[in-house]
């Protein structure tokens, strides 16, 4: 079985690393797996950059040019957008590799044109890590459900015109993807249900397989040593929060976290708490919550990030809309319980007050209660640390996930034979 993974990056970013770990786990299971990427950063021999020098050069410019159709609109900052309108001859590269299965991962920011999917002459598996595949351009809808129809009059574009850019992108997807041999793999039940309810993806087979994690990269470490490594105090209850653009991306829920901390800042526990924020620089103008806060910037080394999770007593992931929640399983793999809002992907990961806390969506007060619940559960000696690690080992280990993908590939090839 020969599988070719197509992704913008191999190890740059959480989605890319997840794709790369899957590729590695499949190789370990005897699958002839290779990756084709716009920019190669790993030293893996089976990962190759785009074979054409012109394609590699234009891939670096695609993200910038992809934004041009958005300029006439006063777009909100609720979600990242991809138009993927510039043409490219990906079919030629894929046919040269001659895979039995083409597996798509994160292909936004102009990397894979909408029109390219009809160029492939083999079954396609597409791991859906957000909502872009079935929308008119946004990666998250911020609650809009117009993807169930044909988009248009897009709230994020601040448009009242049915025939706006979102409708144009949606119609292009419908035109080019109709009748494809395409199997969709959303990473959570919530995302799977959204895909099934969408007008674009409802005709295709959909099977939910969660994100996987390399548990050699994320594992528990001695908390005292982890705190020393990060120069964090030994006498504080440490809460960790992080994401790409953790303080800037509205979807990640930083304002809700600040509101929760402000409530905790009015309690007797305030002096014992420390919040550590990674994934962004110090925003500078954050209101005083009464809780000491440190900003440690971007952490692009998995071992250092694993130590940071291990240094913490609890992690909080207050995303307003999340397809899965990879930082949740990263923290849990390090033995750190997580508080998250009870919606979207986190519902697939956390069992409320068993191995974490699912707060009422968008409710800072319950988020604060969840933080204190985790800290109290740890103090009570209920083995919460062991439970969260065991949960990840059983359900989200990359080997477990790779076995499920290999089974899916075999079923697709048997069906096509």
Image (cartoon, helix red, strand yellow):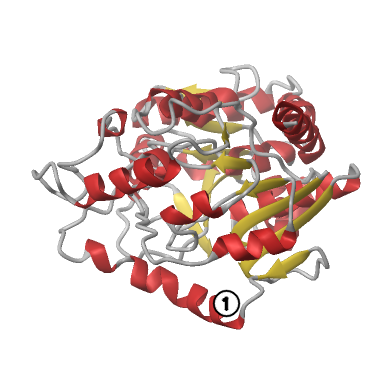
Residue 173 placement (x, y as % from top left): 37, 45
Other-residue count near label 1 (Cα within 10 Å), few / some / many at <14 / 14–19 / ≥20: some
Q: Is residue 42 above or below residue 411?
A: below
Considering only vertical position in the picture, is 281 above or below 210? below
* Residue that mark 1 sits on: 56
- Name the residue: 80% across, 33% down: 403
Residue found farthest to the left? 160
Q: Which residue is drawn at 46% across and 40% down?
A: 270
Q: Quadrant of the N terminus?
A: top right
Q: Where is residue 239 in the image (x, y as percent from the top left)?
A: 56, 43
Q: Which residue is located at x 67 percent, y 26 percent?
A: 379
Q: Looking at the picture, how far across and down is residue 226, in whole percent?
A: 75, 54
In the picture provided, is 283 more to the left or to the right than 187?
A: left
- Quadrant in which residue 194 is drawn: top left
Screen quadrant of the C terminus: top right
Q: On the picture, is 241 further left or further right than 249? A: right
- In screen coordinates, is 121 left or right of 108? right
Residue 246 appears in the figure: no
- The part of the image, by quadrant, that contains residue 31 is top right
Where in the figure is residue 324, as x and y percent of width and height? Answer: 54, 36
Q: Is residue 194 above or below residue 109?
A: above
């Amino acid at each position: 079985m020969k599988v070719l993974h197509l992704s913008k990056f191999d190890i740059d970013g959480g989605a890319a690393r997840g794709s790369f770990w899957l590729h590695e786990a499949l190789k370990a299971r005897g699958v002839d797996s290779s990756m084709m990427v716009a920019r190669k950063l790993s030293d893996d021999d089976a990962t190759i950059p785009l074979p054409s020098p012109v394609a590699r050069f234009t891939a670096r410019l695609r993200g910038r040019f992809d934004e041009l159709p958005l300029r006439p609109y006063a777009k909100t900052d609720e979600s990242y957008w991809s138009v993927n309108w510039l043409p490219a001859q990906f079919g030629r590269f894929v046919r040269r590799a001659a895979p039995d299965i083409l597996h798509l991962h994160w292909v936004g920011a102009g990397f894979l044109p909408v029109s390219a999917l009809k160029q492939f002459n083999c079954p396609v598996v597409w791991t859906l890590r957000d909502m872009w595949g079935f929308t008119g351009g946004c990666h998250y809808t911020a609650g809009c459900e117009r993807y169930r129809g044909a988009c248009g009059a897009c709230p994020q574009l601040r448009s009242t015109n049915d025939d706006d850019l979102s409708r144009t992108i949606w119609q292009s997807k419908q035109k080019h993807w109709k009748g494809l041999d395409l199997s969709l793999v959303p990473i959570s039940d919530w995302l799977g249900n959204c895909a099934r309810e969408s007008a674009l993806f409802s005709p295709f087979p959909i099977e939910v397989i969660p994100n996987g994690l390399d548990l050699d990269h994320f594992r528990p470490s001695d908390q005292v040593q982890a705190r020393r490594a990060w120069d964090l105090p030994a006498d504080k209850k440490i809460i960790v929060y992080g994401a790409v653009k953790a303080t800037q991306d509205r979807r990640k829920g930083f304002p809700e976290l600040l509101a929760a901390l402000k409530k905790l800042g009015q309690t007797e526990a305030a002096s014992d708490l420390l919040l550590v924020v990674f994934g962004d620089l110090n925003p500078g103008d954050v209101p005083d919550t009464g809780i000491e806060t440190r900003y440690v910037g971007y952490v692009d080394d998995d071992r250092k990030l694993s130590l940071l999770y291990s240094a913490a007593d609890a992690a909080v992931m207050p995303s307003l809309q999340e397809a899965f929640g990879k930082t949740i399983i990263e923290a849990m793999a390090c033995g750190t319980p997580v508080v998250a809002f009870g919606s979207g992907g986190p519902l697939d990961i956390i069992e409320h007050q068993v191995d974490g806390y699912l707060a009422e969506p968008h409710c800072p007060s319950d988020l604060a209660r969840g933080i204190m619940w985790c800290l109290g559960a740890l103090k009570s000696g209920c083995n919460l640390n062991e439970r969260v690690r065991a949960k990840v080992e059983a359900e989200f280990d990359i080997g477990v996930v790779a076995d499920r993908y290999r089974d899916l590939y075999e079923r697709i090839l048997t069906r096509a034979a």
